[in-house]
Amino acid sequence: MFLEFLPARIQRKINANNLPFKVINIGLSGEPSAVELERVDLYIDQHFDLFVLELGANDILKDIPSEITQRNLQALIDKVKANYPSITMLFLGIKITFCLAEARTIPFNFVFKK
């Protein structure tokens, strides 16, 4: 259960409380933000009540500059907002502090504060 992905955990809680919501996980483990930005187009026509964005760690691990990650995440947010102007969004930034040089991780800590 420790390694269970967040969408599955959320769906389990929804089911346990008999709520009428379905979680759709459009992310793929290991994919960078640029790929997720393209993938959202495949799902944008589905009805969303809540949009949870949990991205960024793979970009750090793949040495993608934080500016590119920030641009991709903002574009993804803009796409969803354009289709669902009043949607509730939850942003989850991944902070990596282990086994990586500070010079690599510090810029990403600021991406999610913006």
Image (tube, helix red, strand yellow):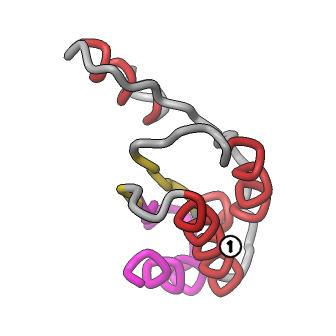
Q: Nearer the viewer, residue 112 or 95?
A: 112
Q: Which residues are magenta?
A: 92-114
| Disc 1 element | helix
Q: Any magenta on residue 11?
A: no
Residue at (72% x, 59% y) in the render: 32
Q: Nearer the viewer, residue 20 or 94?
A: 20
Identify residue for label 1.
72
Q: Position of residue 67 (x, y in %)?
A: 65, 87
Give amino acid for label 1. Asn
Classify residue 95 as left or right of residue 15: right
Q: Name the residue furthest left.
A: 17
Residue at (64% x, 65% y) in the render: 79
When the figure is inspected, residue 4 is found, relative to residue 68, above or below; the finding is above
Q: Any magenta on residue 103?
A: yes
When the figure is inspected, residue 45 is found, relative to residue 21, above or below; the finding is below
Q: Position of residue 108 (x, y in %)?
A: 52, 78
Q: Position of residue 15 (x, y in %)?
A: 31, 14
Quadrant of the rendered image containing residue 93: bottom left
Residue at (71% x, 81% y) in the render: 68
